[in-house]
Amino acid sequence: MLRRALLGMSRSQGIKNLLTRLPVTSDVVARFVAGETVDQAVAATRQLAGAGLKITIDHLGEDTTSRAQADAVALAYVDLLGRLREAELTGAAEVSVKLSALGQQLPDGEKIALEHAHTICAAAETAGTTVTLDAEDHTTTDSTLSVLRELRRDFPRTGAVLQAYLYRTEGDCRDLAVEGSRVRLCKGAYNEPESVAFTDQHEVDRAYVRCLKILLAGPGYPMLATHDPRLIEIALKLARDNVRPVDSYELQMLYGIRPTEQQRLVNLGHQVRVYLPYGNDWYGYLVRRLAERPANVSFFARSLVSK
Ligand code: FAD
């Protein structure tokens, strides 16, 4: 119930306007967001790379409502990629992109988002790194996978994200478990109806394992995004059972969540990538993190009254 209410809030422009005017800064936002500026994102990336972690950077923003805003997001990514190149961090860091931030919801939005994503992929290729397209709510999945197919013609290493909670995802895993394909598997973070997604967490976990089996048995490059200790254990066992070299897949977690575990896995010789968001438009991202863990809500509420 609380999860659904929070996820509903994450799309509310009114609540967003109210909360982002409140002085909620340091504690809560800083736990999950690496900073507001590109300098802060590069500094946080350098620190994580120094500890042996890999990074995927998200310039925060989603549900763009104007062409100018979409253009600005694309430019921000091109700038970020230039900065990562200058800082010699593109060996460790790539970028994650939400197509809704690039204009996917505008009239003729798929075309606009594709053009912008193409520009970002070209900048990533010049910088020597890759792009992964985040997954958003289920109404965007077909469009996002169609943009992925187009991008992969010119940039075959472009990554996709699949959400285990969607009924369709086992089929999408089969389609994408091919040579050269980079696929991030996550549980899914949006408020989805029973008509398209499992809503029981145990069902989601079972679906995640079925998808793991498909991806880890295939010739692609699986990126296993979860903080769930049991699913990480199962993923590593399946990787061993499939005799996969450690550089043929990676584990992924979010910035600020289970950092000790991230480092422990790196110390054991695993590849671990941290999803690192930065920017001012943190509202939707933060509310999804609150919805994942009720304890975070009281942390957030305390910060509102103590400022
Ligand atoms: P859960 O069962 O939610 O969590 C397992 C344990 O992890 C919890 O018991 C807790 O200890 C810890 N934990 C999990 N979340 C939190 C939190 N917010 N705060 C504190 N502790 C927590 N979703 C999408 O829909 N699209 C995407 O493109 C996408 N990209 C992602 C990229 C990465 C690298 C990761 C790690 C997740 C991404 N997600 C994305 C989010 C994902 O779908 C889940 O909502 C999120 O990862 C929580 O699920 P879980 O697998 O960690 O399992």
Image: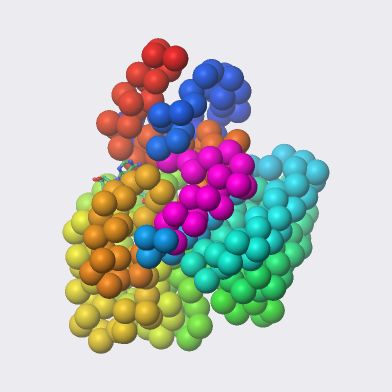
How is the rendered protein coloured?
rainbow
Picture coordinates of residue 242 (x, y %)?
A: 26, 84
Task: Give whichever of 202, 25 is nearer the camera.
Answer: 25
Q: Residue at x 49, y 55 (%)?
A: 45
Of the 4 image quadrants, the one containing the N terminus is top left
Residues rendered magenta in the picture: 32-49
Task: Give whichever of 80, 221 is nearer the camera.
Answer: 80
Would you identify the image quadrant in which residue 271 lies?
bottom left
Query: From this viewpoint, is residue 24 visible?
Result: yes
Q: Residue at x 35, y 19 (%)?
A: 302
Of the 4 image quadrants, the one containing the C terminus is top left
Give the overall secondary structure of the magenta segment.
helix
Q: Residue at x 45, y 45 (%)?
A: 190
Query: From this viewpoint, is residue 209 visible?
Result: no
Q: Residue at x 37, y 45 (%)?
A: 256
Task: Give whichever of 261, 97 is nearer the camera.
Answer: 261
Compared across the picture, whether 74 is left or right of 13 comes to right
Compared with 272, 125 (above or below) is below
Compared with 203, 18 (above or below) is above
Picture coordinates of residue 179 (x, y %)?
A: 48, 86
Would you identify the image quadrant in which residue 278 lies?
top right
Picture coordinates of residue 151 (x, y %)?
A: 66, 72
Magenta stretch contains residue 192: no
| Tally of numbered discs | 0
Picture coordinates of residue 267 (x, y %)?
A: 26, 66
